[in-house]
Amino acid sequence: MGKVFVIPKLLPRKRRQRFSDARYIEGQRLLVEAMKYLAQTDPGENKSAIELLSEHFRTQFRMTDLPAR
């Protein structure tokens, strides 16, 4: 007896258009400024805080977002 393999049909995904939000971009800028400040004051002592902010920045923000210039 043969085995039957079922290949499911993938539905096309709808791409949502992303809109830039000024508050979102400002949040990115504030996190970067906080990391810079912590690194300048005492990098060794603030290493865990910098890592925490960095992890939040990497996981919560899209790479395609650019700060307002």
Image (cartoon, rainbow, N blue to C red):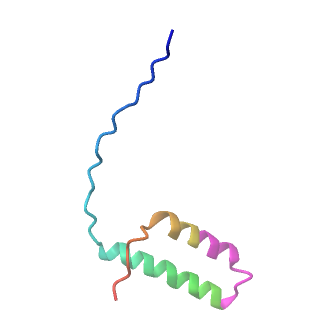
- Answer with the quarter of the image where residue 37 lies: bottom right
- Answer with the quarter of the image where residue 24 lies: bottom left
Q: How many marks?
A: 0
39 to 59, vertically: above or below: below
Going by the image, does 8 lie left or right of 31?
A: left
Going by the image, does 39 lie left or right of 63?
A: right
Specify the quadrant that holds the C terminus.
bottom left
Name, please, the residue furthest toward the top. Answer: 1
Q: Which residues are magenta?
A: 41-52
Residue 68 in picture, x, y percent from top left: 34, 84
Residue 55 in picture, x, y percent from top left: 57, 67
Going by the image, does 61 lie left or right of 48?
A: left
Name, please, the residue furthest toward the right. Answer: 44
Which residue is at 70% across, 87% downward?
42
Residue 8 in picture, x, y percent from top left: 37, 31
Which residue is at 46% across, 64% downward?
60
Residue 18 in picture, x, y percent from top left: 28, 65
Which residue is at 51% across, 63% downward?
59
Considering depth in this image, is 10 or 62 the residue closer to the camera?
10
Which residue is at 62% across, 84% downward?
38
Considering depth in this image, is 22 or 7 the residue closer to the camera?
7
Name, please, the residue furthest toward the front. Answer: 1
- Answer with the quarter of the image where residue 62 lies: bottom left
Can residue 20 be found in the magenta stretch? Answer: no
61 to 66, vertically: above or below: above
